Amino acid sequence: MITVHHLNDSRSQRILWLLEELGLPYELKFYQRDATTRLAPPELKAVHPLGKSPVITDGQATVIESGAIIDYVIRRHAGGRLQPDPSTPAYDTYQQWLHYAEGSAMLPLMLFMYVGRLGEAGAALHPRLESEIANHMGYVEASLAGRDYIMGAELSAADIQLSFVGEVLGAFGRLDAYPNIKAWVARFQARPAYRTALEKGGAYSFAK
């Protein structure tokens, strides 16, 4: 059985959602961030040397990185669900979204969050970060035009991977500028599996 080593206020919430969408059994082990530093507890290093979340164990396998975990679960346990047929061009697009979410889209958002903590010392970086955020969020916004989900009418695992981008954008109070992203976030947050995962994993906020 898959065990999700779940850290509060973290990307591991996406993994719970994925497993709920697939209706797969799993065990949930909770870890709490340090209230002052917001860092993961040292107990996670017993699971993987990096001591980071998300991380899953599945039999003898230990898998880190949300994109790799999602790909692992889909390949090994989903029976073809939540992804296009691997023989089609749509699958290549799906794979690009899986990698894009953390490889490109999240970087300016995370830098914006960290630079914001520097106050005036980080002011010189703000114009470049704002430009990068507008570039990437504009791309996602355009890609969602006329679509319920990033691949079309149906949810895929690419939406689950990309969801963190939309939610962090919401934590920054930026969703009104991107109506397609805003509607997409509202749509996936209303899904029963998403709500069940939230109940099991605990409420989370990226505004901290």
Image (cartoon, rainbow, N blue to C red):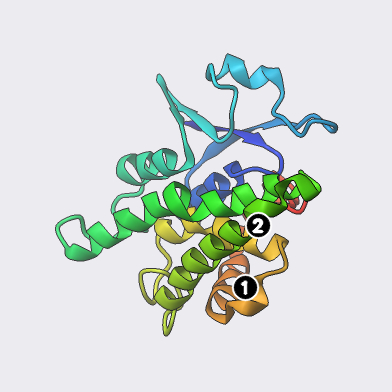
Where does the image place residue 68, in percent across and percent down from the top left? 40, 39
* Secondary structure state at the residue bearing disc 2: helix
Give yes or no for contact between labels 2 and 1 (Cβ–Cβ under 8 Å).
no
Residue at left offset 43%, top offset 66%: 155
Q: Please state if 96 lies on the left or on the right of 26 as rendered.
A: left
Image coords of residue 2 (percent x, y)? 48, 33
Task: Tell me if 79 is positioned left or right of 54 in this view.
Answer: left
In this rendering, the answer to whether 60 lies above or below 121 is above
Instruction: Give the residue at the far bottom of this rendering.
Output: 146
Counting from the top left corner in percent of width and height, residue 66 is at 48, 41
Within 10 angstroms of label 2, few (less than 14), some, or many (20 or more) residues? Answer: some
Near-viewer residue (202 or 8): 8
Do we see residue 81 in this rendering? no
Q: Which residue is mark 2?
A: 126
Judged left or right of residue 94, residue 100 is right
Classify residue 144 by image quadrant: bottom left
Instruction: Give residue 2's mark.
Output: none
Mark 1 neighbour class, 10 Å CA radius: few under 14, some 14 to 19, many 20 or more:
few
At label 2, the amino acid type is: His
- For discs 2 and 1, the disc positioned in front in the rendered view: 2
Helix, strand or loop status at disc 1: helix
Q: Which residue is mark 1?
A: 186
Q: Residue at x 49, y 51 (%)?
A: 18
Q: Residue at x 55, y 62 (%)?
A: 133
Whether residue 137 appears in this view of the structure is yes
Instruction: Give the farthest residue toward the front.
Output: 124
Q: Of residues 125 and 67, which is closer to you in this image?
A: 125
Pick out the residue farthest to the left.
Answer: 87
For marks 2 and 1, the one nearer the N-term is: 2
Three-letter code for the amino acid on which mark 1 is drawn:
Ala
